[in-house]
Image (cartoon, rainbow, N blue to C red):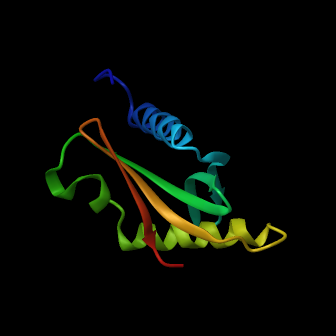
Amino acid sequence: MPPFWTKREQGRQAEDDALAYLLLQGLVLLQRNYLCRGGELDLIMRDGTAIVFVEVRQRSGAAYGGALASITPAKQRRMVVAAQTWLQGQQTLPPCRFDALCIDAGRISWLKNILDM
């Protein structure tokens, strides 16, 4: 990434990279950047019959615990609120999980089922 990119541009590129990676793994995009009162979800995807709420995190290095450590308890609560709000709009309640797609210094790690709802 060019060093002159804004944080928003860097975040958008990280989400683009995460989406491309997950599509290659066979997931299907349902929605991107879902916003609601009290929360936000980067990607909502389908993996077989399961709905996957994906948080994308990027860090330039592993200092301060890296990308995964940046998903704080407060962020986790906002993710759950957003997922519950999204699920209220569905006709049936599908199986679902929360995943994290962490990019540390350009290296992608896909961590499945990081939260219980």
Position of residue 38 relative to residue 9, above or below, is below
Q: For the point 58% across and 60% down, which residue is it?
A: 52
Left or right of 110 in this view: 28: right
Quarter of the picture holding the N terminus: top left
Of residue 44 and residue 75, the one placed in the foreground of this image is: 44
Residue 74 coordinates in the image, percent (x, y)? 41, 72
Which sits in the foreground, 35 or 107? Answer: 107
Task: Name the residue at the left extreme.
Answer: 63
> Can you name the residue that lies furthest to the bottom here?
117
Going 19% across and 58% down the picture, which residue do you hit? 65
Label total for image = 0
The residue under the point 37% across, 25% down is 5
Which residue appears at 80% of the width and 67% of the height? 90
Pick the quarter of the image with the C terminus: bottom right
- Looking at the picture, tell me which residue is in the foreground, 5 or 114: 114
Say left or right for 20 vs 100. Answer: right
- Counting from the top left corner in percent of width and height, residue 81 is at 59, 72
> Residue 49, percent across and down?
68, 62
Across and down, in percent, residue 23 comes to 56, 39
The image quadrant that residue 36 belongs to is bottom right
Furthest residue in direction right, as rendered:
91
Res. 108 image quadrant? top left
Horizontal placement of 64 versus 116: left or right?
Answer: left
In the rendered view, would you say 49 is above or below 93? above
